[in-house]
Image (cartoon, rainbow, N blue to C red):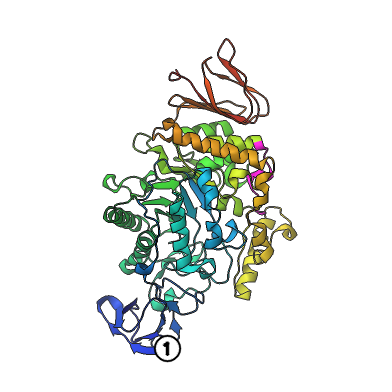
Amino acid sequence: MRYEVWAPSASRVTLHADGRAYPMRREDGGRWHRAAPGTDGTRYGFALDDGPVRPDPRARRLPDGPDGLAAVVDPTRFVWRHDWSGRPLPGAILYELHIGTFTHEGTFDAAVEHLPHLAELGVTHIELMPVCPFPGTHGWGYDGVAPWAVHEPYGGPAGLVRFVDAAHAHGLGVVLDVVHNHLGPSGNHLPAFGPYFTDRHHTPWGAAIDLEAPEVRRYFIDSALAWLRDYRLDGLRLDAIHALTPRAAFLTELSASVDELSTALHRPLFLIAESDLNDPLTTTPRAAGGHGLHAQWNDDFHHALHTALTGESQGYYADFAADPARALTKTLRAGFFHDGTHSSFRGRRHGHPLTPEATPAYRLLAYTQTHDQIGNRALGDRLSAHLSPGLLACAAALTLCSPFTPMLFMGEEWGARTPWQYFTDHQDPALAEAVRAGRRREFAAHGWPESTIPDPQSPETRLRSCLDRTELSRPPHAELLAWYRHLIALRRTERALTSPDWIDDLTVSPDLCVTYRRGPLLITANLGRGPAEIHAPGDTEVLAAWRPLGLPDARGTLRLPGECAAVLRHSKQYG
């Protein structure tokens, strides 16, 4: 087989494969190649200028972790039992899932056992948090160091194939979270091979990846295409694109490459950005001058709904909490809250306005909880730790019946009480202590006693974050699960709920009763404790209600109890 590696500064490169050494030949552009024996599973690495043998930067498998030899993976040998023609993004419902805490076992195979639950729930795509290798066994995955490989403790490449194939058998698409803005602090061998990083730009994690270099851009784009092509994924979630420097050329090239692959494979593929920019260009088509990504997370929706539900006003919640009714109104109607307005958290103007006529609403993702919004809290506490079941039901209705693409965080559908905390398994004692001390120092500055901050390195922190499925049979969890299933079923049967159109006739009262139209449907959620009155003609049909509703009175007024949501349909369009 042919082995290749990019090492432009090396004078000599030696391939070590199955215990033998083979001098490699240099090509133009600093690429080295050599034909040598190798089949699926062959262990190999490269020595630069007679230095230590390092794993291939494009390794598909690292059986012994980031510092061990690579193993050859032949994607043509993957066993696929189910055909898959793909599932597009419009009309989708995503489910964010972390393999290491979705089950106590923390493996792809253990997660497969619970795919029937997700199929019955009615979601369309599983969004896997990063699965690239990192030192140790357990971690969030955002400190991965091998962007082409699959974390061995999860099950490696073969385990991912089994998981994706099983998901397809249940009609579920799979999206993978990938990180192109930095690599982890330990086990990163890229700098030894070439100038992958630059001091011209900096990120919160140090020197930036040099996306101005064509070889570096190609490294990450080829990796993205390999995930989509070889593992039959439906899409990628791009972590923190605001930290890519520069970003425009890379994102445009990536989106064009993915669209070309989609055409070649005859199945839909999509890219979802996590972005702190509130920039419409992210999802504007390339032909219109944008980056051409297919959707982006919308934290403004989360922040507006979170402050309305909880009353929290610290940090970036401050601008939303100043007038929760206005914040909800603006984000539901226009997508972004900060669209050129002043952000007190940032101390400057932030964002740009969307043009609803040019941006289908499904291009924004709506969610009440994510790994970030839970895990970056001091105790990793979910909304269910603080809110009544009624308010959780209201949050579900506003998310699942919004014009946006809904996303759930694992366990949300039954109001899981398990926290989701920040956990690591760094093997370097100095790094482990630095992370532990930094976490405690960060939250101590906000008034949390250091003794209450979970130790990221403790195995118990990860175990506390694993889902507890014994909750499913107990109230109120069973009732919440039934509510989520019912709302998701309505999205399948009521075409208005998956329309690309934005909201009609939205009102949010000062006491936070939200009502809006979607075609013939009226969605209403009363976040207040007292009852609210809404207009509903006498022949209105109740499609879903968290609590029993009476009939409208002679004036067409319906009393909606406090902390209650409902979906109503009238035989004629509301006017």
Q: Which residues are magenta?
A: 378-389
Quarter of the image holding residue 498? top left
Residue 420 place in picture, x, y as percent: 62, 54
Quarter of the image holding residue 390? top right
Q: Main secondary structure of the magenta part?
A: loop
Residue 193 place in picture, x, y as percent: 39, 77
Quadrant occupied by the C terminus? top left
- From the viewer's perspective, is residue 312 above or below residue 443? above
Residue 125 place in picture, x, y as percent: 46, 49
Asked if residue 385 is among those painted magenta in the image, a careful observer would answer yes
Q: Residue at x 62, y 30 (%)?
A: 564
Q: Residue furthest top?
A: 554
- From the viewer's perspective, is residue 356 above or below residue 410? above
**Would residue 274 be visible to someone looking at this image?**
no
The residue nearer to you, when weighing 471 against 235, is 471
Q: Residue at x 29, y 52 (%)?
A: 266
Q: Label 1 sits on what residue type?
A: Gly
Q: Is residue 229 left or right of residue 313?
A: left
Crowd tier of the residue under label 1, counting other residues whose Cα lies within 10 Å: few below 14, some 14–19, many 20 or above:
few
The residue nearer to you, when weighing 434 against 80, is 80
Label 1 belongs to which residue?
19
Quadrant occupied by the N terminus? bottom left
The residue nearer to you, when weighing 73 against 304, is 73
Residue 214 place in picture, x, y as percent: 31, 66
